Structures are given as C-alpha cells and as structure tokens.
Image (cartoon, grey):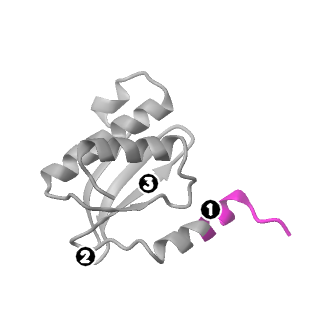
Amino acid sequence: MSISKINKRNKIKKRIRKHVLGSESRPRLSVFRSNKEIYAQIVDDTSGKTLASASSRDKDIADNTKTKIELSKLVGLSLGNKAVKAGIEKIGFDRSGYLYHGRVKSLAEGAREAGLKF
C-alpha cells in the first residue's frame, strides 16, 4: 500500500516536532509552503503564542513581482527583522516535513541574513 505525499510529509513533520520545541528562550520558526505562497511564523509552544509572522501575501512583499524563491528570501528577511525587533535571536527551525531545498532553504537564508541564529 503506497503512502500519499501528504501522509509521508506528516510522518516526517511528527519526527521533526519531537526534537524542535519552541520555548521562551528559543522559539520555533514554523514554515508552511503552498503551491503559490509561503508562510512563516515564530511560535512559543509553552505559552501557545505567535511572536512574529510573515508571508508572501504581505503588502510590502507581494508587490514585488519576482520568482517564488526570491519572494521566500524576502519573507525570511521580513520575519527576521520583526523577530530581532522583538528581542529574539536564537530559534529552532521547523521545516514542517518539507525538504531543506528551494523555497524553504531560501527563507532560512533570509532569516539568517536578518540576524537570527539556528
């Protein structure tokens, strides 16, 4: 019996979440990638709050007509700048079962350029 793509990603996601937990000192950067957009948020799992978020649908990012990889980098930069302003420097990276490749990698590099460490 074959496992569908979504079920396979969910298995990987559960495996990652066993190790990457967001705390107050080191929150979790969670990524969601759809076919058109990319969303990222920094989450404190102990209190259940989102500390910062950014997506390719934000007005300042969506105006740029670029490739999806370039938009992902802009999302990472935007999220990183918001996090640094909020006093967050260290995070855990939760790629949500996606391969660290393409748009997910670009978002992570943008966040690193903005000053986040993971």
Residue 57 in view, yes or no: no
**Residue at horizontal 29%, vertical 66%?**
27
Q: Quadrant of the C terminus?
A: bottom left
Query: Percent from the top left, x then y, of residue 115?
Result: 23, 47
Task: Give the distance between the C-alpha atoms of the residues marked 2 and 3, in whole angstroms.
Answer: 19 Å
For residue 9, what is the image quadrant? Answer: bottom right
Element type at mark 2 = loop
Magenta residues (range): 1-11
Q: Which residue is mark 2?
A: 47
The residue that appears at 55% across and 46% down in the rendered structure is 101
Kindly identify which residue carries mark 3.
31
Mark 2 or 3 closer to N-term? 3
Q: Position of residue 20 (x, y in %)?
A: 41, 71
Q: On the rendered structure, is 26 left or right of 66?
A: left
Q: Amino acid at mark 3?
A: Val
How far is the residue under mark 3 from the one under mark 1? 13 Å
Is the stretch drawn in magenta largely helix, strand or loop?
Answer: helix
